């Protein structure tokens, strides 16, 4: 992502470095939880197809929480 000149600091401040690390952690968390939910969905769908709605609800809640974390970090 290209940032406007008004958002670029050199050298970066401690707060900006911390913010960048948090964004990277949230991205990694998002990827790992997506993978975990995929595995859970595959295993439960094989055993019990009735859990599909619950898996979908858990996935949506997880996405909502991750979006909130991203919004907090960027503000």
Image (cartoon, grey):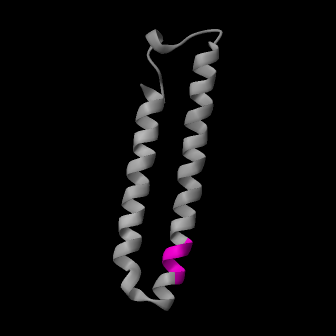
Query: Residue 60 placed where, x, y %?
Result: 37, 59
Q: Is residue 67 above or below residue 48?
A: above
Q: Residue at x 53, y 74 (%)?
A: 40
Q: Is residue 17 above or below residue 51?
A: above
Q: Is residue 57 above or below residue 72?
A: below
Query: Residue 65 placed where, x, y %?
Result: 42, 48
53 vs 34, nearest the viewer = 53
Image quadrant for the C terminus? top left
Q: Residue at x 52, y 70 (%)?
A: 38
Q: Residue at x 43, y 32 (%)?
A: 72
Query: Residue 4 placed where, x, y %?
Result: 44, 16
Query: Residue 7 placed where, x, y %?
Result: 47, 14
Residue 18 lies in the magenta stretch? no
Query: In this figure, what is the number of numbered marks?
Result: 0
Magenta region: 39-43
Residue 42 lies in the magenta stretch? yes
Q: Is residue 17 above or below residue 63?
A: above
- Residue that sits furthest to the bottom in the current view: 47
Q: Main secondary structure of the magenta part?
A: helix
Q: Residue at x 48, y 25 (%)?
A: 2
Location of residue 56 (image quadrant): bottom left
């Amino acid at each position: 992502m290209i940032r406007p000149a008004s958002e670029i600091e050199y050298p970066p401040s401690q707060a900006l470095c911390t913010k960048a690390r948090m964004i990277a952690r949230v991205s990694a968390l998002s990827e790992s939880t997506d993978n975990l939910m995929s595995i859970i969905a595959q295993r439960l769908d094989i055993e019990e197809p009735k859990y599909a709605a619950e898996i979908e609800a858990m996935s949506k809640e997880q996405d909502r929480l991750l979006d909130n974390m991203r919004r907090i970090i960027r503000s």
